[in-house]
Structure formats: structure tokens, C-alpha cells
Amino acid sequence: MAKVMKLSHWSESLVVDVKLNLGLVNEDVPGLSRVLVNLWKWSRGIMELEKNGVTVSFSNSWDQLTVSIKTHKGNLSLLKGLWDALTKVDLSLLDRAISEASTQVNVAREDTAARAMAEALKGLIPGSPYGNHPEVLLGVDLSRVKPEDVRRALDNLAYYSVTAIGGDVDIGGSPANAKWPSVRRYGDGEAKVKLSGKVQNTIAVAYPADSIYGRVFNYMAFNTLLGGMGLISRLYVEIRVKRGLAYYAYSTYVPLGGVGFLIALAGTREKYVNEVKELILKTTESMSVVNDNDVEMVKGNQRGRLTVRAESPEGLTQMYSIIPLYGLPEDYYTRYVNFLSNLKSSDIASITGELGRHYMAVAGP
């Protein structure tokens, strides 16, 4: 029996990414998008597309709701029915859709990593829709979604952008002008959330960062070295490799239209929580010192990831979909590659001085 199977990219595939004017920052009723996704999944129009070999999936975020489509190029004409499928749902299934979405959210709330991140964002960006995690939706009661809310959302449905790899598409619908809300204030402090039946705690430290229109490349390089390179990232090395205090330790940088945030996370036992909290803060502060070896690791990691993502039509579509969504220059990734080629230690270290404020959350037993 073969142990390794190598598959080449099937050039006859068509992949489409559609960004809709729904999401946490632009829905009238918080959580409406989560409910609507279930109504779409069960709609006759989406089912008909899937019967004909069109794979349709949905993902909700802060700025938009994404519809991802993959099919054979021979099914190109079928996508003309996509908009009709999106704007027609069976509202008799609304209660079922709310129940399903509520279950998904409640499960996410019990995950220590998701919950810690959500609590950290809520504290960092209080009173803003950006302070809510799209998977956890803290404090949101989905039963408040009413049929008229769904009808209004569908009547106003439009797309921010359409990105296609493998052919030209006509999905119908109308374009929308994106407006991203600004964040008026940031909070700092700490929260502890008790979750029953858990063995491990997750610690999340959230920092304000630049939006997609700021020093994104610098923050991407910073995040890569801090916690985005897996086993050789500073957080992982300092907390797990050197001290054995955590099962995982990493960071993520999320640049959005109205805000950006950097979050460092680590999973550890109760008796190590205070020590790991201090290590996260100290490791982040240590980023003020970056050497040439660090720079070369960041360059190699990011170039390699770009290459791997670009090898699949799905990865390529996901990468490039942010360009029309946010109105970025078409040579955005060429600029990033050039940035990496000229990357200096100061480009990374300078970000450390911008991380003075943070909010920390611990979720666990």
C-alpha cells in the first residue's frame, strides 16, 4: 500500500470568493450572520448548486461574511443562480437555524482558547463590534433575531468584492461601498473566566495594532517572530521549549478595515498561570532586540508560506480577496515580498514600542 500520495493541481477548477456586506460590524442585529448562514445551507438554491457539483461554504468575520465556492469550469453558468440562492431562504426554518447557531456559539464559548481570545478582545475594545469574537459572540442572544431582521438583511444584501481564480464569473447582485467603523477607545486590565470540566487554562493577551491600512507588513514580521513560526517562535521557545510550562504558545495578528489587534496565547496548568502570564509579557517586551538571524528566519518563513498558499486555487483566492475588499494596491503581495527582501531588524523591533497597552484574559478551571 502506498504511504504517500502526490496530487498535482487540477487546472480545470474554478474558485470564487464573495465578500458580503454582513459581519459583526455591519449587521443590524448581533449574531444575525450566524443564523443566516444556517438558513443558506438549508436553502433549496444552495442545495441545487451542490447537487450539480458546486461546493459552497460560509465563514463569518468582523468586517464581512465570506461565501467560498469551488467547482469545475464547466459549471461556470451555474453560478449565475448564486445570488438568487442567497436572497431566497425558507423562514419557516428560522427557529431551527437559531437553535443550531446557538449551539455552535455555546460550544465555542466553552473552548478555553476561543473564550480567552474573546474575553481579551472584549476588554481591549469595549463597546465596539470589533470587541466581539465572531465565533464566540459574548453576551449575544441569538433568539432576538426575528423574521423581519432576516428579510431586511436579504433586501439590502450586496457584495463588497468578488475574487475568482480560473475564469470570469457573473454572480448577479449589486456592489456595496464598504465603511469600516473606527475604534474610539481601548481598555486595559485582566479578566478570569471559570469554565467547568477543564484541565488546562488558556491565557490570551491582546494588544492594539494597525489596521489593514497601517504598517501591516511590519506587524506581520513582528508576529511571525513572536509567535507565528510554530516551534521556533519566541513564545514557544521561551514558554514550552526552555521551561516546559505550556502545551501551546503562539500569537496571531488580525488586520481589519477599522482596527487591528495582536494576540498572544498560551495553554498551561493552573499552577503555572501566573508564571506564564509574566513570560508572555516579558517575551513580547524582548522583541525590542532583534538580530540578523531572527530577520533571516522571518524572511524564510514568510516566503515559504506565501509559496505554499499560492500553490492551490483556494489559497490564492483567499490571499488576493483582501485586495478588492479593502481597496489595496493590486501589487500588494509584490510589495510584501520586496519588504521582506529589504527587512531590517529595526522594522520588527520598532513595533515593540507601540504595544504599551494590553488586556489579558484567562479561561479555564
Image: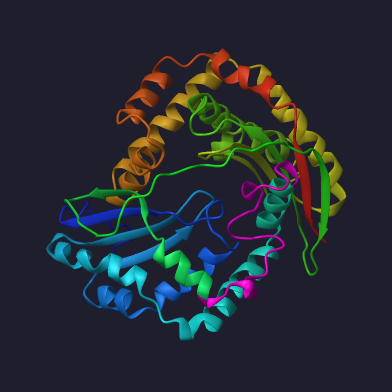
Q: Describe residue 255's horizontal placement relative to residue 119 as left or right.
A: left
| Image quadrant containing the N terminus | bottom left
Which of the 4 image quarters holds residue 124?
Answer: top right
Residue that extends furthest to the bottom in the rendered view of this protein: 92
Which of the 4 image quarters holds residue 80?
Answer: bottom left
Residue 6 visible, this orientation: no
Q: Describe residue 331's horizontal placement relative to residue 281 as left or right.
A: left
Tell me what residue is drawn at x 48 percent, y 30 percent.
Answer: 213
Q: Position of residue 39 (x, y in %)?
A: 45, 75
| Image quadrant containing the C terminus | bottom right
Tell me what residue is drawn at x 57 percent, y 42 percent.
Answer: 181
Tell me what residue is drawn at x 75 percent, y 46 percent.
Answer: 123
Residue 130 visible, this orientation: yes
Residue 18 is covered by the magenta coloring: no
Residue 137 is covered by the magenta coloring: yes
Which of the 4 image quarters holds residue 347?
Answer: top right
Tell me what residue is drawn at x 55 percent, y 28 percent.
Answer: 219
Count of marks, rendered view = 0
Q: Describe residue 333's horizontal placement relative to residue 23 as left or right.
A: left
Q: Position of residue 74 (x, y in %)?
A: 12, 64
Q: Is residue 116 above or below residue 239?
A: below
Read off the magenta span.
123-147
Q: Position of residue 136 (x, y in %)?
A: 64, 60
Q: Position of residue 55 (x, y in %)?
A: 30, 67
